[in-house]
Image (cartoon, helix red, strand yellow):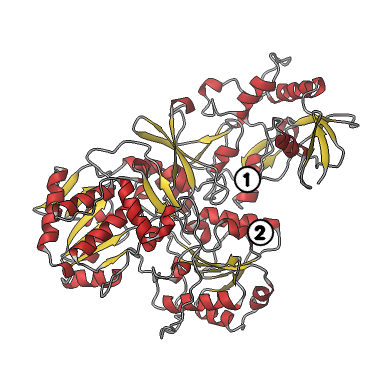
Amino acid sequence: MPKLTINDKEIDVENGLTVLQACEQAGFEIPYFCYHPRLSIAGNCRMCLVEMEKSPKPIASCAMPVAEGMVIRTNTPLVEKARKGVLELLLINHPLDCPICDQGGECDLQDLTVSYGPSTSRFDLNKRAVSNKYMGPLIKTIMTRCIHCTRCVRFATEIAGTPEMGGIHRGEHTEITSYLEGALSSELSGNLIDVCPVGALTNKPYTFHGRPWELTKTNSIDVMDAVGSNIRIDTRGQQVMRVLPRLNEEINEEWISDKTRFSYDGLARQRLDKAYIRKEGKLTAVPLTEAINTVAHVLKATPANEIAALSGDLADCESVTVLKELMLALGSPHLDCRVDETVHDASNRSTYIFNSTIAGIEESDFILIIASNVRHEAPLINARIRKRYLQGGLNVAAVGQAYDLTYPYTHVSEQAPVIKEILEDAHPICAQLKAARKPMIIIGQGALNRRDSREILRLCQEIAEKYNMIQDDWNGFNVLHTAAGRVGALDLGFVPQDKGLNVHEILVACQRGQIKTILLNNVDNIPGGSFGEACVIYIGHHGDEGAHRADIILPGLAYTEKFATYVNTEGRPQQTEKAVANPGEAQEDWWLLNEVAVKLGFNFKFETRQDIIQKMIEINPIFAKLNQVSAAPWTKIISKYPETLSHISFKSPIVNFYMTDPISRHSSIMAACMAEIVGSGCSKKCA
């Protein structure tokens, strides 16, 4: 470990660090614009200049590796003069529009100019103006403000994997642009707003809507997919103004997907803020107490074996727990959370979670993807795979349709029989699998909702064991979920009980009139006609597919309006925080179900949310460890299933990345992305 002296303080640092990183470790602040810890080094802003002993001029600390015996000074008159000169040059052409700039209050250029800049400028010529570039419905550009740090170019090329941005011309005529001035096709493009240190790239839907000091900031969890990205919800009054990423190295690092960031406007549209009962064929608003009493009356009048319950993609763990207790109290075994008809076994946790964890991707040297368009199903996991690819030494192979995943991979086949070939060592990729030190397999939901899914799952487990994916300190068997509410419901055992029907059998029974009443907990992806003549009781927060078919609607809360637990695809329980008040008469989903139980005479002793959490811990101890992944013991599927592997091509369940749930389907911003990005054909979003 090299030893160097910084401002008369000796410090030992790791090999490979830069002087800038060493200074930060020693506790000395170095200002910079172009440097970003997750991007390659550009060294073009020169703001990070420091003085090095025996060097004839200041050095760029972001680009200088540490070496034994270095003597660095960060606060000499020469360094101060250099910084003032750099800022004076940067501000030559920067417009004086801070009062109307959306970056105001969060601008690195503002902050560093106050701290390190000159008090006056010696330049009095007219400022240069640059025409704004078009980058789609999400990113607003004011390119006269651009300081050419190239962070956006490096992010698009390295992290997003869509090299659609770059610099044109030279010298003072340099401009940053998307080459064809079309909408950016990356699912991570909104992160350009965060990496831009000035107001050149800003949030287009948020333009002129607010200032950071006006907003209340709430730390929460994203539910747009099953990754569980950590986010910050900024609100003003009762309105969600924007959603930003929150640092979590183990899950999303500091990025979020565009759907997470921009679908928030769907929270206010088509909301269910009242209870409804269908009277004479029309849904009629009624007091909440009347709707709850009616639900209790219907359930009481229906034989237990003719009642079923389904839990959907956005259902939180608390509501799933109460609904399960209610169904057991009623005596009905017909409950299921696998509304996409997947074959997950709730008794074998290792077969339905991402066992290696998301951060574990960076340890793998071979990844076999089965039936998953990871880029659309989990953009942050895809970015993590790309990050590992850029580090070198990673081979990727994919079974399923050929998608642009932003990194090179071997396309094995579109059909399931090749899985058996891989198991039998009869495919060319087997040699790479054998040579891998920490191989992993990622199984998408597109492989688990077919007739032959049980056999596919068993064969994938066999592959995992044969090719050394299961080790003492490594479990490379991973299932990638797409729904935020799925893993938590499986952990709570919300699956058919003894002699109970699964989701497919429940829907068939509804059509045949054998199921008379069905409760839908945030179920919005099943066509309304699937329920036949059954009485549909819907709990949810949007007037989506489930509400359209419902006979009774109990208004629930969206993830921004409640404290709730969700378990992400790697099995990590996390909690959302309440950012805004309940709209209208809407209440927590668990509270609504518990009130129904009380009306029926059941006393679950669920007076507070903490009581439900205690019950969740009783059902599954993993809920006692918030924000932690509890490793699942490896349990092998022994039973062989008679189904022969189908030659039908695998398909990803995500047909349209921008609209996958009630919130994003009601977002005008997501609709604009649909029209301009998917509709224009500049990205194969619907492939």
> From the viewer's perspective, is residue 210 above or below residue 443?
above
Q: Position of residue 687 (x, y in %)?
A: 48, 62
Q: Residues within 10 Å of mark 1 (few under 14, many from 20)?
A: many
First along the sequence among labels 2 and 1: 1
State the residue in front, 154 or 581: 581
**Picture residue at 56% right of the left edge, 60% below the top:** 404
Q: Which mark is residue 155?
A: 1
Q: Marks 2/1: CA distance? A: 15 Å
- Location of residue 220 in the rendering, given as x and y in whole percent from the top left corner: 44, 43
Q: Is residue 508 visible?
A: yes
Number of callouts: 2
Depth check: 84 or 134 in front?
Answer: 84
Residue 389: mark: 2
- Residue 682 visible here: no
- The type of residue carrying mark 1 is Phe
Q: Quadrant of residue 108?
A: top right
